[in-house]
Image (tube, rainbow, N blue to C red):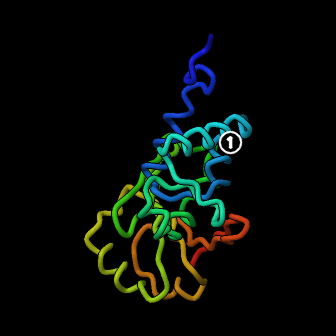
């Protein structure tokens, strides 16, 4: 007889790590992390919810690690995670970041930061990022609208990103 871990090929611990690291993800985002095993991941999610290890808000389509995360979803993290999923094939390692950086990831020999900048927070983020060394990192900056890019003065911006929250499609552009 196989153990649960053998059935899910260790994906349970990986799935738990993602949800607890990022606190709030869309159900669809988690499924896209495991594209070959969608059906078994759905079963695993159901099992983890029954065990009380994660929370599934079916109405909003969210998977969360705590009731607090479920009550106050971090939509900036969700948008940033769509950008990470766009790079999924090249990603070697990824983890969360500290404000205003939502995510860090490594791709071959390159280090990336994904920042999310809400409307009217551009100057605050510019100020916070002034003290951050930027010589070895490439930054992907998620904005709520394209006009925000003109207010951003941080260094090493590889691209600005707009995320369609309904489809998860990411558009990239640079300042002109």
Q: Is residue 17 above or below residue 23?
A: above
Splitting the image into 4 quarters, where does residue 8 fall? top right
Task: State the residue at coordinates (55%, 63%).
Answer: 78
Task: State the residue at coordinates (56%, 42%).
Answer: 50
**Residue 108 visible in the current orientation:** no
Task: State the residue at coordinates (43%, 56%).
Answer: 66
Splitting the image into 4 quarters, where does residue 34 fall? top right
Residue 138, how many percent across, how many down? 46, 60
Of 14 and 130, the residue lying toward us: 14
Q: Is residue 26 left or right of residue 39?
A: left
Report which residue position mark 1 lands on.
Answer: 42
Of 147 and 121, the residue lying toward us: 121
Image quarter (top left, top right, bottom left or bottom right) of the C terminus? bottom right
Residue 118, how many percent across, how many down? 48, 80
Q: Furthest-left residue in view?
A: 131
Q: Is residue 58 above or below residue 127?
A: above
Task: State the residue at coordinates (50%, 56%).
Answer: 64
Count the marks.
1
**Residue 5 visible in the current orientation:** yes
């Amino acid at each position: 007889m196989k153990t649960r871990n053998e059935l899910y090929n260790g994906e349970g611990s990986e799935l738990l790590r993602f949800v607890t690291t990022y606190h709030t993800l869309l159900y669809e985002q988690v499924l896209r992390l495991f594209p070959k095993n969608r059906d078994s991941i759905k079963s695993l999610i159901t099992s983890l919810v029954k065990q009380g290890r994660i929370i599934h808000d079916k109405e909003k389509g969210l998977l969360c690690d705590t009731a607090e995360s479920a009550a106050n979803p971090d939509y900036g993290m969700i948008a940033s995670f769509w950008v990470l999923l766009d790079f999924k094939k090249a990603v070697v390692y990824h983890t969360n970041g500290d404000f205003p950086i939502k995510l860090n990831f490594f791709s071959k020999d390159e280090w990336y930061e994904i920042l999310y900048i809400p409307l009217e927070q551009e100057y605050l983020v510019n100020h916070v990022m002034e003290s951050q060394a930027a010589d070895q990192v490439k930054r992907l900056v998620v904005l709520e609208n394209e006009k925000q890019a003109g207010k951003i003065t941080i260094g090493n911006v590889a691209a600005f990103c707009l995320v369609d929250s309904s489809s998860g499609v990411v558009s990239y552009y640079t300042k002109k």
